[in-house]
Image (cartoon, grey):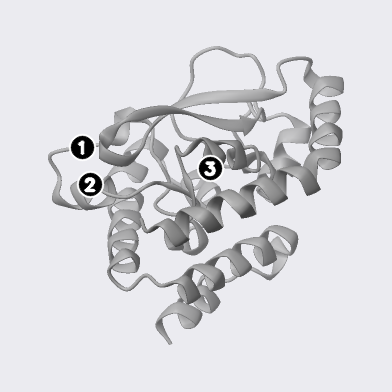
């Protein structure tokens, strides 16, 4: 990633953290009132060059111990506050700290948990050659991923065999034609659909990026 992309990441992440700090406090308070501490959740993910790091999120699940690595619609581990945070993608906002640290970028392939990463796969090799991001084209196209998984008889198997390969292919395709203008469009749509999730359609996203 060029210096200009990294500079944009740092300035944007710092500005976002400052502007959103009162909102972060409000979200943390809502989580604490419903389900206690901690309000943040840290999960091991695989980043650039297959280097593991801890991703930051607002906690949306109860303290229930082990469970599936993916979350499908109707997962009983998700709290009431957590459902709202997930619908509007608010739980992802603490990853602005990951951007400042250099673990992530604003735009880049979403980092996966180790169990789903196959370093020997050619698609994974390409995806892991860049810094992961808070948002990417696959995240937009599959914004309703939890609903899709909720209708699968075996969500984890369906994710591994069907959704994940499709997401990797989209990420590689985006990387091949990436530009600052494309990134700005991606960021705008990410914010727009986070604020207006009811207006999301896969067809609109595909039309914007593929005509």
First in residue order: circle 2 vs circle 3: 3
Question: Measured from the top left, where is residue 89 in percent x and y?
Answer: 65, 48
First in residue order: circle 2 vs circle 1: 1
Quadrant in the rendering for residue 52: top left
**From what the image shows, is residue 181 above or below residue 164?**
below
Disc number placed over residue 118 in the picture, else none? 1
Question: Measured from the top left, where is residue 161 in percent x and y?
Answer: 27, 46
Q: Callout 1: helix, strand or loop?
A: loop
Q: Among all residues in the image, which is located at the extreme bottom?
A: 211
Quarter of the image that includes the C terminus: bottom left
First in residue order: circle 3 vs circle 1: 3
Disc number placed over residue 124 in the picture, else none? 2
* Circle 3 or circle 1, nearest the eye: 3
> Which residue corresponds to mark 3?
99
Q: Is residue 186 left or right of residue 176?
A: right
Quarter of the image that includes the N terminus: bottom left
- Measuring 78% from the left and 19% from the top, which residue is drawn there? 35
Contact (CB < 8 A) between labels 2 and 1?
Answer: yes
Q: Nearer the viewer, residue 74 or 127?
A: 127
Structural crowding at the residue carrying mark 2, measured as other residues with C-alpha within 10 Å and reported as few (<14), some (14–19) or many (≥20): some
Q: Is residue 130 left or right of residue 55?
A: left
Structural crowding at the residue carrying mark 1, measured as other residues with C-alpha within 10 Å and reported as few (<14), some (14–19) or many (≥20): few
Q: Callout 3: helix, strand or loop?
A: helix
**From what the image shows, is residue 211 above or below residue 181?**
below
Q: Is residue 147 left or right of residue 15?
A: left
Question: Measured from the top left, where is residue 146 in percent x and y?
Answer: 54, 46
Disc number placed over residue 154 in the picture, else none? none
Structural crowding at the residue carrying mark 3, measured as other residues with C-alpha within 10 Å and reported as few (<14), some (14–19) or many (≥20): many
Q: Answer yes or no: is residue 159 visible.
A: yes
* Circle 2 or circle 3, nearest the eye: 3
Whole-Å distance between the Cαs marked 3 and 1?
24 Å
């Amino acid at each position: 990633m060029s210096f200009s992309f990294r500079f944009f990441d740092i300035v944007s992440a710092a500005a976002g953290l400052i502007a959103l700090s009162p909102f972060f406090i409000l979200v943390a308070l809502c989580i604490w009132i419903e389900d206690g501490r901690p309000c943040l959740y840290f999960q091991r993910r695989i980043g650039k060059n297959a280097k593991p790091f801890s991703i930051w999120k607002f906690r949306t699940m109860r303290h229930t111990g082990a469970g599936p690595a993916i979350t499908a619609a109707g997962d009983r581990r998700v709290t009431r506050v957590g459902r709202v945070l997930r619908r509007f993608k608010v739980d992802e906002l603490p990853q602005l700290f990951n951007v400042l640290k250099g673990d992530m970028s604003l735009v880049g392939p979403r980092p996966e948990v180790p169990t789903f990463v196959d370093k020997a796969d050619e698609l994974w090799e390409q995806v892991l050659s860049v810094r992961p991001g808070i948002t990417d084209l696959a995240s937009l196209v599959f914004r309703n991923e939890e609903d899709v998984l909720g209708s699968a008889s075996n969500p984890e198997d369906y994710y591994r065999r069907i959704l994940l390969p499709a997401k990797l292919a989209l990420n590689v395709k985006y990387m091949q034609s990436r530009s600052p203008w494309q990134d700005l469009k991606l960021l705008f749509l990410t914010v727009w659909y986070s604020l207006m999730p009811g207006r999301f359609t896969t067809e609109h996203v595909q039309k914007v990026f593929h005509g």
